[in-house]
Image (cartoon, coloured by chain):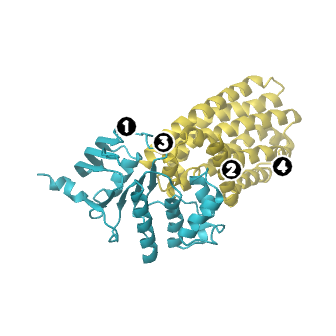
Chain colours: A yellow, B cyan
């Protein structure tokens, strides 16, 4: 366990040292949502209608932004192959890495979302469902995205391919995440979509690292 | 010292990207031995080292570690293997001390500082590696030789960017290691200042088949 604690704090330290890159998704998230009233319409009625879906779409796109580098630096500087030679479980290491990635890139989106929701006149009933669905949703976006990041780690320009691989898998998260917020805003029960999202997240956290490990092993061996 | 070899390789063939590199390669490595892989660029030295380390599965043939067969994606070595590839395995945004702590989580900082002093990096321990020269960064990698308790060292071009004095020091370190019953496999285009058994991979190239 001590080994994994060390790995965890190393990942946090690395994230802190490279904090400039990590600010990108958050800045994108903040910019797009603050441009919406200017581009679409400043009418509270219009904005509050599109707010649930808009926040979710922007959160999804901004989480895609930071994925590319998830394993790339480890691959390029050789830390990945060294990691594979260490007597540690790669499954757990990948889980730790993705978790740290979520902590520094996904969680900030969740924290800032209520502020942006205010700018978009999200009705009061939508706040709690939005935060809880984003909390679960960004976590599963990180884990699912890690599969794509692992598969494309050895490619030089992997951005486009990564999006193509990952987008179809992101769709269920978007559908259930956005409908959680919309149901709440329209006065229906939002428990069903939220629970499906929770189940989806559990599956992603448990199984995605398996796929990532296989993808990384293939990438190192080429 | 036991007579059974630490590592033995039989009928090993490797094909990469449609090109057959070597064929029917066989050798043994006993404890106390230093084996230098020779051959021109592209003959498959690095590929062989990756296969031996268990990082590559693109081979046919059998390998044994202490008599135990190595499966694909094996983890037989555990802490018995020290692998230094042509990629550094060093994070540029971390300091030498932080980098080495990752490799040796159980080792006290004072020992890591000693090792850094051995490779001539005293007082650089807290500086991010990005600020060090290429040779100094390579020395951070080589500091692992002073900290590792692994039996088998697999070193892929360890002397890249290292000055002559540094090369001699590393050679001495390798001698110490094999004198203690360790074994080392090394690829280098430097002339080694220490005696080593040579294995020329071009003897096993597909064209050389008779």
Query: Residue under mark 1: which chain is it in?
Result: B
Distance between mark 1 and mark 2 Cα atoms = 33 Å
User: From what the image shows, is residue A147 above or below residue A11?
Assistant: above
Query: Residue under mark 3: which chain is it in?
Result: A
Q: Is residue A1 visible?
A: yes
B102, B57: nearer the viewer: B102
Question: Which residue position is annotated with label 1?
Answer: B71
Query: Residue under mark 2: which chain is it in?
Result: A
C-beta proximity under 8 Å, tags 2 and 4: no
The label shown at residue A42 is: 4
Distance between mark 2 and mark 4 Cα atoms = 44 Å
**Label 2 residue SS:** helix
Question: Which residue position is annotated with label 2?
Answer: A9
A160, B156: nearer the viewer: B156
Residue farthest to the right? A124
User: Are discs 2 and 4 located on one and the same chain?
Assistant: yes
Q: Is residue B93 visible?
A: no
User: From what the image shows, is residue B129 above or below residue B80?
Assistant: below
Q: Residue at x 52, y 41 (%)?
A: A165
Distance between mark 4 and mark 3 Cα atoms = 46 Å
Task: From the top left corner, tell me how far across and down residue B55 is, in percent.
Answer: 42, 47
The label shown at residue B8 is: none
Q: Residue at x 26, y 50 (%)?
A: B27
Crowd class of label 2 (few under 14; some 14 to 19; many from 20; radius 10 Å): few
Question: Which residue position is annotated with label 3?
Answer: A215
Q: Nearer the viewer, mark 4 or mark 1?
A: 1
């Amino acid at each position: 366990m001590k080994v994994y604690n060390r790995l965890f704090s190393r990942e946090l330290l690395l994230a802190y040292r490279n904090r400039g890159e990590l600010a990108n998704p958050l800045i994108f998230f903040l910019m797009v949502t603050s441009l919406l009233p200017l581009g679409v319409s400043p009418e509270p009625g219009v904005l509050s209608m599109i707010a649930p879906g808009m926040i979710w779409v922007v959160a999804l796109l901004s989480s895609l932004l930071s994925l590319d580098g998830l394993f790339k630096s480890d691959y390029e500087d050789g830390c990945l192959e060294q990691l594979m030679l260490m007597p540690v479980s790669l499954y757990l290491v990948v889980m730790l890495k993705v978790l740290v990635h979520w902590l520094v890139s996904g969680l900030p989106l969740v924290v800032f979302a209520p502020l942006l929701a205010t700018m978009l006149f999200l009705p009061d009933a939508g706040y709690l469902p939005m935060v809880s669905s984003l909390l679960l949703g960004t976590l599963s976006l990180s884990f699912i995205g890690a599969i794509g990041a692992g598969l494309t780690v050895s490619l030089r320009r992997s951005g486009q391919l990564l999006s193509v691989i990952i987008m179809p898998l992101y769709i269920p998260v978007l559908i259930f995440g956005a409908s959680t917020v919309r149901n709440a805003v329209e006065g229906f029960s939002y428990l069903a979509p939220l629970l499906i999202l929770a189940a989806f997240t559990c599956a992603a956290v448990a199984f995605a690292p398996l796929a990532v490990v296989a993808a990384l092993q293939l990438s190192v061996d080429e | 010292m036991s007579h059974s070899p630490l590592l033995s390789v039989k009928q090993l063939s490797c094909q990469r990207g449609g090109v057959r590199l070597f064929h029917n390669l066989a050798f043994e490595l006993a404890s106390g031995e230093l084996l230098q892989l020779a051959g021109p660029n592209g003959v498959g030295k690095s590929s062989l080292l990756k296969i031996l380390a268990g990082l590559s599965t693109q081979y046919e043939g059998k390998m044994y570690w202490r008599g135990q067969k190595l499966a694909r994606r094996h983890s037989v070595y555990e802490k018995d293997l020290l692998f230094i590839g042509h990629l550094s395995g060093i994070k540029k945004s971390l300091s030498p001390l932080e980098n080495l702590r990752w490799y040796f989580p159980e080792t006290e900082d004072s020992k890591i500082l000693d090792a850094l002093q051995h490779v001539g990096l005293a007082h650089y321990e807290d500086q991010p590696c990005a600020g060090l020269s290429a040779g100094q960064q390579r020395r951070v990698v080589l500091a692992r030789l002073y900290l590792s308790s692994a039996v088998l060292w697999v070193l892929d071009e360890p002397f890249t960017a290292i000055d002559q004095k540094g090369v001699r020091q590393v050679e001495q370190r390798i001698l110490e290691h094999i004198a203690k019953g360790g074994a080392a496999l090394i690829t280098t285009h430097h002339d080694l200042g220490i005696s080593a058994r040579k294995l020329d991979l071009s003897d096993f190239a597909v064209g050389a088949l008779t």
